[in-house]
Amino acid sequence: MDSQPDLWKKAEQKDRDFIRKASEEFTIFGPYVEIIDGWFRDPWVETWIYGDQKGFLMLGPFFPSFFCSILDVMVIYVSPFWRRRGVGKTMLEFARVRAERKGYRFLRAHVGCENQAAFKLFKKAGFKVKRKIEGYYPSGLSAFEFFKEVNSK
């Protein structure tokens, strides 16, 4: 899935503390420590750890692709030391390949309007803004909805 597949592993219970701590960065959007912890326990959501806690990625929900052609990048988190080093782009390529292998046509993500780093990352990875959604997050902040065709690199 990546040029170095050994860098990826499905998250396990022992990774929960890392994920919860990292989730604190998302509290501007609402109670995301609890929300992300709930997704971590959800059997329809996959959580992947990249490298030795360089970051994590949550994809889902994994409903049968013939019911829904869209797979969400629910969370992408890159540890501070690894930002602006290509890790985020690698993680989004992993998401694209994962979606392709599962039969999805599109990847979707919601990015907070004030999150310029994430906005640039998704644009650089080939995602297109579909629309702006006012008050998308529990905190009331707005988001851009991004889409990418899975079969386009």
Image: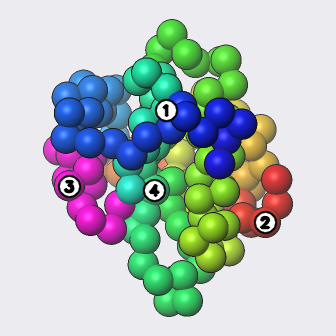
User: Residue at the spot x=67%, y=41% of the render?
Assistant: 2
First in sequence: mark 2 vs mark 4: 4
Q: Please, what is the dominant secondary structure of the magenta stretch?
A: helix
First in sequence: mark 4 vs mark 3: 3
Q: Give the spatial CA distance, label 3 vs label 2.
A: 29 Å
Identify residue for label 2.
151
Left or right: where does residue 38 sit relative to residue 86? left
35 falls in the magenta region? yes
Q: Quadrant of residue 56?
A: top left
Vertical position of residue 110 compared to residue 26: above or below: below
Residue 47 image position (x, y, % from top left): 38, 48
Q: Nearer the viewer, residue 22 or 123?
A: 22
Q: Tell me the element at label 3.
A: helix
Q: Give the spatial CA distance, label 4 vs label 3.
A: 13 Å
Total count of labels: 4
Q: Please tell me how crowded label 2 is: few (under 14), some (14-19), or many (20+) other residues with Cα within 10 Å.
A: few
Question: Can you name the residue that lies furthest to the top here?
Answer: 81
Comparing marks 1 and 2, which lies closer to the viewer?
1
Q: Tell me the element at label 1.
A: strand
User: Residue at the spot x=63%, y=67% of the render?
Assistant: 101
User: Residue at the spot x=53%, y=45% of the render?
Assistant: 111
Q: Which residues are magenta?
A: 31-45
First in sequence: mark 3 vs mark 1: 3
Three-letter amino acid code of the residue under disc 2: Asn
Three-letter amino acid code of the residue under disc 4: Leu
Residue 50, labelled with which disc? 1
Q: Give the spatial CA distance, label 1 vs label 2.
A: 23 Å
First in sequence: mark 3 vs mark 2: 3
Residue 59, labelled with which disc? 4
Q: Please tell me how crowded label 1 is: few (under 14), some (14-19), or many (20+) other residues with Cα within 10 Å.
A: many
Q: Please tell me how crowded label 4 is: few (under 14), some (14-19), or many (20+) other residues with Cα within 10 Å.
A: many
Vertical position of residue 29 compared to residue 67: above or below: above
